[in-house]
Amino acid sequence: MSSNIADLFKQGEPIEAHKLIRLTAPQIEEIGDLMQMHRPVSKGGFGSEGNLAKLARKPDAPMARELAPFFLAMAELTLAKGWGKDGPGKKAVKVWKAAGQQLRVASGDLATAGALADAKAIQAAAVRIQAACTSCHSIFKY
Ligand code: HEC
């Protein structure tokens, strides 16, 4: 699901991507179902967590261009899903939103840096994406 949305972002079809996000987000029962996409390819994922770590160490423009729309799709789905009422309270809802927004902005930065093949900017964006993942996981991952 998030890879189809990522393809639409990549093809420059943000409106179609957002239509699919609106359709898909209510079908996500558990955030874990979405997060599994970050697993290694050998475990049925998109390999995005591993590739993100690689990108932060060694900038690679084609990989940045490949990953940016995927992270953007994940950010939009995470934001569209939101954190349910049964969560640990109002502060949690804020943290969830802030982490999703941070991921959205950093994914846009990664797309731009990849298009410009700007190694320093690619690395910086990858580190900011990792920070967004970590800020949410520090509260919600169990
Ligand atoms: C807005 C919150 C949020 C953001 C942002 C977020 N995650 Fe997660 N992630 C979670 C939660 C909650 C879980 C635990 C889900 C569960 O186990 O039910 C999780 C679990 C995971 C898992 C384990 C999934 C599994 O079952 O194998 C991986 C891998 C993961 N996240 C990667 C990432 C990466 C990479 C990013 C950044 C690109 C990211 N996450 C951003 C909330 C978030």
Image (spheres, rainbow, N blue to C red):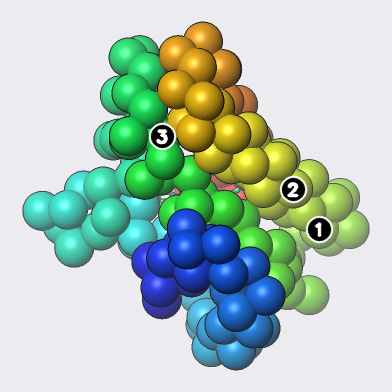
Which residue is tagged 3?
A: 64
User: Which residue occupies 47% across, 58% down?
Assistant: 10
Dot 2 or dot 3, earlier in sequence: 3
Q: Give left or right: position of 133 versus 106.
A: left
Q: Give left or right: position of 106 versus 84.
A: left
Q: Nearer the viewer, residue 134 or 125?
A: 125
Residue 67 at x, y percent in the picture:
40, 44
Which residue is tagged 2?
A: 101
Q: Give left or right: position of 117 versus 127.
A: left
Instruction: In the displayed orientation, state which residue is furthest to the right.
Output: 90
Q: Nearer the viewer, residue 111 or 70?
A: 111
Query: Which residue type carries mark 2?
Result: Gln
Compared with residue 28, is residue 80 higher up or lower down, i.e. above or below? above
Ligand 1 is within 8 Å of the C-beta of the residue at disc 2: no
Which residue is tagged 1?
A: 93
Q: CA distance from mark 1 to mark 2?
A: 12 Å
Compared with residue 7, is residue 100 higher up or lower down, i.e. above or below? above
